[in-house]
Amino acid sequence: MAAGGDTVPCHPSPQASLPMAMHLLAPARLLIRQIAKSGWSQPSRQASGGVVAMTASRELVRSESVLWKSGPEAYRPLLLFTPCGCRAFPVRGRLKVNMVAVEGSDLKVTGIDFLKSQNCRLHHTDAYNIKNLVVRRGQPFLMQLNFSRELKATDKLAVRFGIGENPMKIRGTLMSLNPRREPDFSGWQISIVKSSDKECLLSVTSSPRAPVGKYTLHVKTGTNIYKPENDTVYLLFNPWCEADVVFLADEAQKKEYVLNDTGYIYVGSAYNITGRPWNFGQFEEFILDACMYLLDKSQLKLSNRRDTVLVSRAMSALVNANDDSGVLLGNWSGNYSNGTSPMDWIGSVSILQQYYKTKKPVCYGQCWVFAGVLTTVMRCLGVPSRCVSNFNSAHDTEENLRVDIYMNEYGDKLDRLSLDSIWNFHVWNDVWMKRKDLPEGFDGWQAIDSTPQEQSQGIFQCGPCPLKGIREGDVYLPYDSKFVYAEVNADKVYWLVKKVNGKDKYIRISTETEGVGVNISTKAVGENKREDITSQYKFPEGSEEERKAMQRAYSFLRPSGLVPRARFASILPMENMISKPAVPHDTVSQSGIQLEITNKEPLYPGNPLELAITVKTSTSGYWTISLVGSCQLQSYTGKVEASLGYIKETIKLEGISEKQVALKIPADEYMKTLASVEDEVHIHVTAIAEVEGTDDKLTKEATMSFEYPPITVQMPETAKLNEEFTCAFIFKNRLNMSLDNCKLLVEGLGIFKMATFDEGDIKPGKIIKSEVVCTPTRLGEKKIVAKLTSTQIKGISVEKTITITE
């Protein structure tokens, strides 16, 4: 008998038969050479019940005739050795069995080829900088198994995919796929494409409703389990799969909203819009793992990770750090000494990489940074996403679709009197999905926002909210549709605050119904230019459809106890606030007065600000008009940083005529503010006109941006993969002032990592030149982005495109 074995009891069924024994032997490739009736020898060791079981190592087992006689005469135990151990079977009669064990006769997996290059190309995931296989749900992928021997029909084979710490079939987190069985209820499928010799090509299709995340892969053959060295497979949402809720039919849109890793975020003011280049970088190193970490941190149930609505809502919460130590800490104070100024970021990559490395919030972000990072996260997970810039964006804390603006007798804004505010621009995101949780008709783009403005369900998150619902005034729809609707539709109500007998008196000047939510912008598909998407959010101002949508929205308004954030506006205690009645829309004025605000010269920092207010009348008659105009510097959130000057004049006009009044601000009045505030500031001009002898009052606002000299980028139009080239960045200070503490930030995805050059002080007329030696690692059209910051100027940006060929 085989050496080294111990006797253990074994209790086979007495109904077992020799054919059954032979059937169980076949998978072990045991050859029964001879079965013949003969006498029995007694075993050396015998267990109770007349059955003896002997164990041996899994090494080669050599056994000659295994003969013994014990137990009841009707049933006799037959001991069979295999490389997996031993089996005992009762048989009738007298048998002589001569057995030869074959080394490695049980089926084992010796290797797995994930066919990464082929699969990732078909799944549009080949750009991810990661060793693991990355695939999209609902779409087949191939994998090749290598075995210790040829796969036979009787072999047991199961490919197991598990997600989470303790995958279980009953929870739908463990899929055990057998290519010889019918697909189960999980929606996953597997089939054998080809099997020859010791190789087997399998096709695996995940469910189009599978939870996204990291799956571990194991292969079971019989009692053997094979765990590959790189056993994690990343599963993403799939805009290319019609059965996936994020399916997007247009190929150009998928290329833009899923695969494009660069773009623009539009900033500035409503009628002076500039595109700020931004590197989303969703395919860069550690970005996918950072997004997977956010999924784990979201505490979403694994089953809820299949739901794009819940995933996008969770990500809107996690990109800000307010409730859950998420990615970015917001800061609108103007002091960024303990971190990075929001103006200094040129992309999402360094932010997410730093967060993934430290697991601590990154300092600091403002709305365009939050939106840029959220775009990266959603595109990385496979959800079509775009940055959306809303100009003259209302922050309506009272949910009354009205933003109250208070001014003193000189036209200066009084922030302390209002919780509401109008931001020059606000940036959020749209994500594309079907809304199976809503009635029909609300699929498509959904607004989400990670900037921490208001709490929703107790935490700082916003959306997803269907654009079609916003457009139609269906503000009852989840999530946060009332707030988003107000951002693009609120009325501006202007109040003049005068001192009467020592107390403030509030005089309504006018109501502007068309000034909020203008020129809503995103990057155009396949082009480096702005696309106006205002019509996707609202009907044309003054149209019948717009009036009906507004009436519908008003019908759903209810106070919801929103808690305003003090950092966005100075807050007056509620007990000191004066309740104000609802304000009707303005009627056409008697005099037909109009105001226009312009700049007479380019607005270069260091030069006087040459501004003008033009007063026009469009009806006949004699008009005496009291005009007040003021100029302030304010941040993009509308926060006043400095009051620069004002004018106060009485103007007489006859008939249809006009008069221009100059408003000139010397450079000395604003240069100190430019240097002391770390935010980018804008020039804000307000004009108030009152027509004597009538009730005509009119207010006009205009926000303008400073103009800067450009950065020039010198590099070839094309370059070869893995071959060096030089990129030069040149800047000449054409301003009449020195730029202090200058930094040049540069980044080229797939070409070189982000680099910073300390340029010191750049005097008027001075030229600086910095060079980067580039080695492209990825093919195709790539962009290089640069930004220059200084004490006085917070950001001059430029980008240039280069094509990388083989």
Image (cartoon, rainbow, N blue to C red):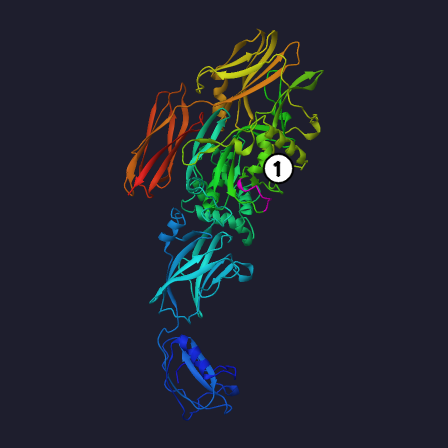
Write the residue at 57% across / 34% down.
471
Q: Is residue 654 left or right of residue 215?
A: right
Depth check, front residue: 44 or 541: 541
Q: Is residue 52 visible?
A: no
Q: What residue type is disc 1 on?
A: Asp
Mark 1 surroundings: few (<14), some (14-19) or many (≥20) residues within 10 A: many
Bounds of the magenta segment: 437-445
Depth check, front residue: 681 or 707: 707
Q: Is residue 40 left or right of residue 11?
A: left
In what quadrant of the picture does the N terminus appear? bottom left
The quadrant in which residue 202 appears is bottom left
Depth check, front residue: 331 or 687: 687
The quadrant in which residue 29 appears is bottom left
Magenta: main secondary structure? loop
The quadrant in which residue 151 appears is bottom left
List x then y, in percent, for residue 264.
Answer: 44, 34
Q: Mark 1 points at which residue?
A: 474
Up-down: is 351 above or below 299? above
Mark 1: which secondary structure?
loop
Q: Can residue 295 be seen in this view?
A: yes
